[in-house]
Amino acid sequence: MKVPLLDLKTQYKTIKDEILKITAEIYESQYFILGPHVEKLENEIANYCKTKYALGVSSGTDALLLALMASGIKEGDSVITSPYTFFATAGSIVRVGAKPVFVDIEPDTYNISPQKISEALNSLKEAERKTLKAIIPVHLYGQCADMDPILEIAKKNNLLVIEDAAQAIGAEYKNKRAGSLGDFGCFSFFPSKNLGAFGDGGIITANASSFYERMHILRVHGSHPKYYHKYIGGNFRLDALQAAIVSVKLKYLDEWTAARQNNAKKYRTLFSNAALSEYIILPAEKENRHIYNQFIIKVSGKRDELRTHLNNAGIGSEVYYPVPLHLQQCFSYLGYKKGNMPVSEDASANTLALPIYPELTEDMQVYVVEKIKEFYR
């Protein structure tokens, strides 16, 4: 049996007619950049995330970059974030000239630890603390970080909060949607996301009109009105084709999320019946709406050998992420060493993503768990 990590072709078949219809309309209009389809999606996402504003941008990476630019974060500043996330989180901080300050994660959710943030702040010298401008918590794998203490720390220290919600559209923390909790919410429409485009795309949510208005200008090279530049911005525009496609898919997002959540429940039952608790730790579900962008298991050693075994059986899997950011070569100038972030390092060495997409069948899940049991027994 073949069980891919993700099967977008099966999903596409269910919405193909709607996609072809709306894209044909755009081809006829020849209106490809920004415009009414982008505005429509912005309104829909703002409503979905329960925020006042949403701004369509060219990618999830550019969402982070634009939020940092709109915040006025620049060379000489520093930003606290997680070392256990996709590269764009820290890369965007460096691209505006600022310094990432890495803080270790929680061992169960893999999200940034509020306690470690406090410890990091207390360990900084006065001069270093003055450079801190923001915290970027990452809502990893579809579950929100523990935001109340993070927001409290930010308020106490006069720091902005930029939510990296690239993997978490629709996730909730105490009945509040990801992207509505901090000053900015940054989302990705990369095709593998729960709400994916047919190429790159992203969106930023915000509640403050001042941030929204500045981002709106920065999105088009800092131009307002056209050809008059108060700021140096960039080309961060979302194109109409991607916006229209995401808008079609948004109608089905809650249905797809429910299917992912149901698949997670099935996995829990199957793993329990297989009596694999000695070898496998299943994902913690601490918040009331985990959307399962990924289903991450932690294994007791031989992770890479298990992955090879699954691959040989036709089962897709992935390692997110094999090298934590504080140990990446490009960040060696920051001075972090192996052992500085033990929880992140342990997660990088021992976690594995299993298929969780909405169209995954129960037979496929049974096969996945059988093959994992076969490996360990």
Image: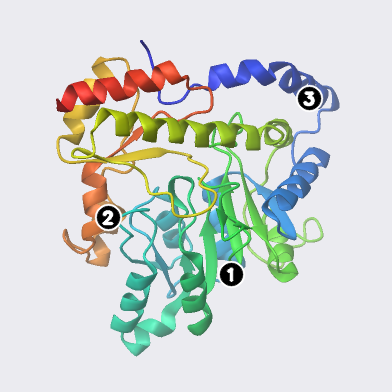
Q: Residues within 10 Å of mark 1 (few under 14, many from 20)?
A: some
Q: Is residue 264 above or below residue 136?
A: above
Residue 277: x %, y % from top left: 23, 39
Point out the residue furthest to the top here. Answer: 1
Q: Residues within 10 Å of mark 3 (few under 14, many from 20)?
A: some
Q: Is residue 314 above or below residue 272?
A: above
- In the rendered image, is residue 310 in sight? no
Name the residue at 31% across, 44% down: 321
- In the shown orientation, is residue 338 left or right of residue 89? left
Residue 153: x %, y % from top left: 46, 78
- In the shown orientation, is residue 329 left or right of residue 192? left
Residue annotated with mark 1: 71
Amino acid on which disc 1 is placed: Ser
**From mark 2 to mark 1, how far is it between C-alphas?**
28 Å
Q: Residues within 10 Å of mark 2 (few under 14, many from 20)?
A: many
Looking at the image, tell me whether mark 3 or mark 2 is earlier in sequence order.
Answer: 3
Name the residue at 43% across, 30% down: 266
- In the shown orientation, is residue 81 left or right of residue 328? right
**From mark 3 to mark 1, how far is it between C-alphas?**
36 Å
SS for callout 1: loop
Front residue of this view, candidates 269 and 172: 269
Q: Is residue 90 above or below residue 29?
A: below
- In the rendered image, is residue 29 in sight? yes
SS for callout 3: helix
Amino acid on which disc 3 is placed: Ile
Name the residue at 20% across, 28% down: 306
Residue 116: x %, y % from top left: 32, 71
Residue annotated with mark 3: 22
Residue annotated with mark 2: 344
Q: Is residue 135 above or below residue 363?
A: below
**Quadrant in which the N terminus is drawn:** top left
